[in-house]
Image (spheres, rainbow, N blue to C red):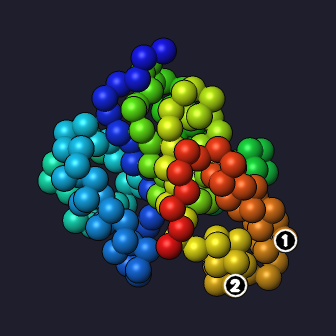
Amino acid sequence: MTASREVWFFTAATATGGGGVRHTVALMQAMSQLYGDRLVIVGRDELKNIPLPRRVGRYVAVPLRSRAQKLWWFVRGGAYDLLTPFVDRWLAEQAQMPSLVVLDRSWIGRFAARLVRRGVPVVTMHHNVEVDYVGSTLATPVLRPFLLPVIRSNERDALRHSSLNLCM
């Protein structure tokens, strides 16, 4: 399979603000300057509400899911991220793989193994140790025992399968 000249940027950022979103916007701007119309941003539909780079080949909007859908994919696929199952289907439909994929946040690291098996180099941006961050800030005590193993597995996949891991 030949690689396209596209560069895919996957982000699990939300439009709620904070340092992570500012970092993501700055990273998208820099990548836009480097890759221009070859850049494909894959992210949540709500990211349209933040200032996206002007020079982008295309934006693939990931629709929001209901709570029932989130629960189903967590139980069925062991996925706790904001891109499942849409990105799984989208990846399967792509005839050509890109020349590079950047995963913005390690909790979507489960995509790294799949992309590397298809011959795509992957760079993962690690903002935090997500297991610690989610465990201490996002997850309720009731959810922690269920979420943390999934996030730990995603981080492990990112670390093992990415061509380059960048930690902040």
Residue 114: where, in percent of width, then height? 62, 35
Give amino acid for label 2.
Answer: Ser
Image height of 168 relative to 152, above or below: below
Q: Which residue position holds label 2?
A: 136
Image height of 67 relative to 22, above or below: above
Q: Is residue 66 left or right of residue 4?
A: right
Residue 6 seen in the current view:
yes
Give amino acid for label 1.
Answer: Pro
The circle drawn on residue 12 is none
Residue lying furthest left: 54
Residue drawn at (55%, 45%), measured in percent from left and top?
163
Image height of 22 relative to 55, above or below: below
Neighbours of disc 2 within 10 Å: few (<14), some (14-19), many (20+): few
Residue 13: where, in percent of width, then height? 45, 64
Q: Is residue 17 left or right of residue 58?
A: right
Residue 61 seen in the current view:
no
Residue drawn at (23%, 49%), measured in percent from left and top?
34
Residue drawn at (54%, 27%), measured in percent from left and top?
119
Q: Nearer the viewer, residue 78 or 149?
A: 149
Q: Which residue position holds label 1?
A: 145
Query: Could you tell which of marks 2 and 1 lies nearer the N-terminus?
Result: 2
Residue 133: where, in percent of width, then height? 64, 78
Q: Name the element at disc 1.
A: helix
